[in-house]
Amino acid sequence: MLMTKGRRPAIRTLRGWAINVLQEAGALHEFEEHGWAKDRADPHARERAVELARQDPPTGVSPADAVAKVREVLDSIGDTCPECLPDADQ
């Protein structure tokens, strides 16, 4: 059986591409209960995402713009779920 390394899925927006890169690098994960993306706060995963963006930007996007979009998306995603109620005990 012939096995090939799959390419990244086609993404319609630059933001969607950046989210995919962040997930691939392990910088984001999906919150199981509500489906929101959450920041894993892993500095090594963040650096991997930046390197992936720099080395393999989408067609027609400069490496600098790809890195900027990855950082912008990462800055816009928190480490808590916006749908979860705050803990009353805190």
Image (cartoon, rainbow, N blue to C red):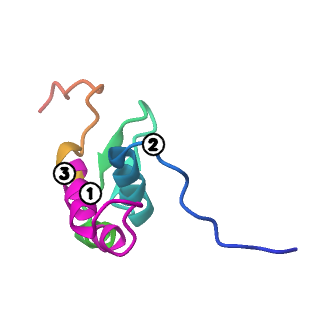
Above or below for 53 versus 55: above
Which numbered disc flags the more N-terminal residue, 2 or 3? 2
Among all residues in the image, which is located at the extreme front?
60
Q: Are marks 2 and 3 in contact (CB under 8 Å)?
A: no
Query: In the image, what residue type sits under mark 1?
Result: Val
Q: Which residue is mark 3?
A: 72
Which class describes the residues within 10 Å of circle 2: few (<14), some (14-19), or many (20+)?
A: few
Mark 2 vs mark 3, foreground winner is 2
| Quadrant of residue 54 within the rendered picture | bottom left
Above or below for 82 versus 71: above
Task: Please state the horizontal and vertical placement of residue 43, each as a whole percent of the image.
Answer: 22, 69
Q: CA distance from mark 2 to mark 1?
A: 15 Å
Q: Nearer the viewer, residue 52 or 65?
A: 65
Please state, as top left, top right, bottom left or bottom right, where the C terminus lies in the image.
top left
| Quadrant of residue 62 within the rendered picture | bottom left
Residue for point 36% across, 50% down: 19
Q: CA distance from mark 3 to mark 1?
A: 5 Å
**What is the magenta segment's predominant secondary structure?**
helix
Does the magenta segment cover residue 49? no
Residue for point 37% across, 36% down: 36
